Image (cartoon, rainbow, N blue to C red):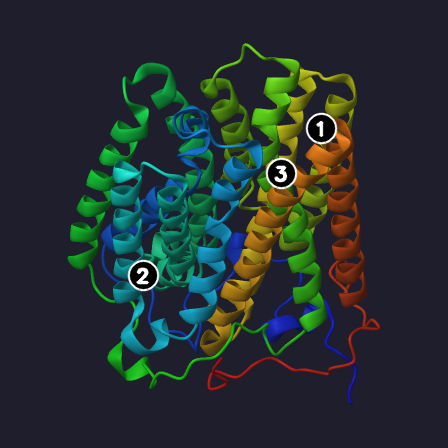
Amino acid sequence: MGAPPTHADAFDGRPDEVTCDDVRADRDDSPATGKGSGFPFSVILVSVVAVMAHTALPTPVYAIYRREFGLTTLQVTEVYAIYALGVIAALVLFNSLSHTIGRRPLLLIGLICSAASNAVFLCADSLGHLFVARLLTGLAAGTFMGTATVAAVEVAPRRFARHAAVGATAANIFGLGIGPVIGGLGTQFLNAPEHQLFLCHLAAVVVLAVLLLTTREPLPRDARVPFRWTAPKPPSADRLTYAGLTLTGVSGMATLGMLAGLTPHFLDTFYPRSTGLAAGLIVGGGFGGSALAQLAFQRMTISRGLAAGAAVMSAGLLVLTAAILFGSGVLYTCAAVFTGLGQGLAIGRSIQEISTRTAHAERVSAVNLYYVALYTGAAVPVIALAFLEKAYGLSTAGLAFCGFALAFCATGIVQLIRAGMWRGAPTAGDGTGAGPAGPDDRA
């Protein structure tokens, strides 16, 4: 077995120090990109924002459900987190489907799932309805994550092609950030937010579905293959780098998931008079910081972006530790923003690395597996926190999680160092000796 490729050889053998402006969007092994107007690209990005916003939109509304349905804290946590099961199910079951039916039909399926989720929320009168609605939300989000990222790269006009992957990822995180803010505003100013919020979102999804039907299909018919189900897989080249990117991303996404689950409990404990709007703004600040980092630092190189992201995310976790110890809302809000900024830098550069340096036939599978790991990391801490808080209290549960997230981040950085992320010389690695994937190596 040959020595594993260094980062300089990773994926397609391009140099390490590339910026978003250096990435070739018109790869030889990809369908043609850069043709036509930016309308299909815009429709896909707005659809991503809408679908992902729906995953966090109910966060401030859970207080209403708790009162109306008599839910316990653990039940509310389970309702919040169950959407991850839908996400993972969609990513695994639909992993290869877009190669057969095309990108647009699969995105339409996602919008249909989102519309169905809204319909169930509108009729919800029990815990079971909330579980079904959240599961449908997860199916919609999971359908969109990998496919929409790849479709955005494929339909982006030339002036946006170099930033398409980062833009799609930023739209994903921006949707997660704007969702709880809209939900918080709704609980503050609407008479019946548990109905009006979902009715408005349903209308938006219907409009987006109609607009998507008017756009061109990104995947040409001659590039499609017969359906053969396969589980999401890492790229065949440089899996050590992929593992490091995944571990770092899981740390960041788990932190934001933990903030979404911990914030209501933190405010109830230390600021009992706070409103749903406050919780929505804090959680939205974390996800908003993530989207801002991805958009504001597009010219930063992949390796520098990953290093900066890991450093800022670690600093945010340390600030979060202090916030929990001292019960400080100011420190807690700062921690949410810092961890969001760091997570955005790390995940944005990871998606850029995976989506632009993986062979076209492996790209959807690699991105889907990355998202499976991320959303497992986002859901597990939320559920675990509910049990830990009940057994050991809020402070102990929060501090234990901060240690867990820091350990994952550090392990991911060690993996990237071993893979040669910050140096071009050969390094010891995973021993696979895998070379760059060819265009015919289908997932």
Say which of 303 and 271 sits in front.
Answer: 271
Say which of 366 and 27 sits in front.
Answer: 366
Which residue is identified by label 3?
258
Q: Is residue 310 above or below residue 154?
A: above
Which quarter of the picture shows residue 153?
A: bottom left
Marks 1 and 2: in contact by CB < 8 Å? no
Residue at x 74% of width, y 24% of height: 324
Residue type at mark 3 is: Met
Q: Earlier in the sequence, mark 2 or mark 1?
A: 2
Badge number at residue 441: none
Image check: 94 left or right of 113?
right
Check disc 2: other Cα within 10 Å, few if <14, some if 14-19, many if 20+: many
Residue at x 37% of width, y 21% of height: 187
Q: Position of residue 98 (x, y in %)?
A: 35, 71
Check disc 3: other Cα within 10 Å, few if <14, some if 14-19, many if 20+: many
Image check: 196 left or right of 268?
left
Which residue is identified by label 1?
394
Q: Position of residue 72 (x, y in %)?
A: 53, 32
| Distance between mark 3 and mark 2 Cα atoms | 34 Å
| Label 1 secondary element | helix
Judge whether residue 199 can be spotted in this image.
Answer: yes
| Distance between mark 2 and mark 1 Cα atoms | 47 Å
Which residue is identified by label 2?
155
- Quarter of the picture containing the N terminus is bottom right
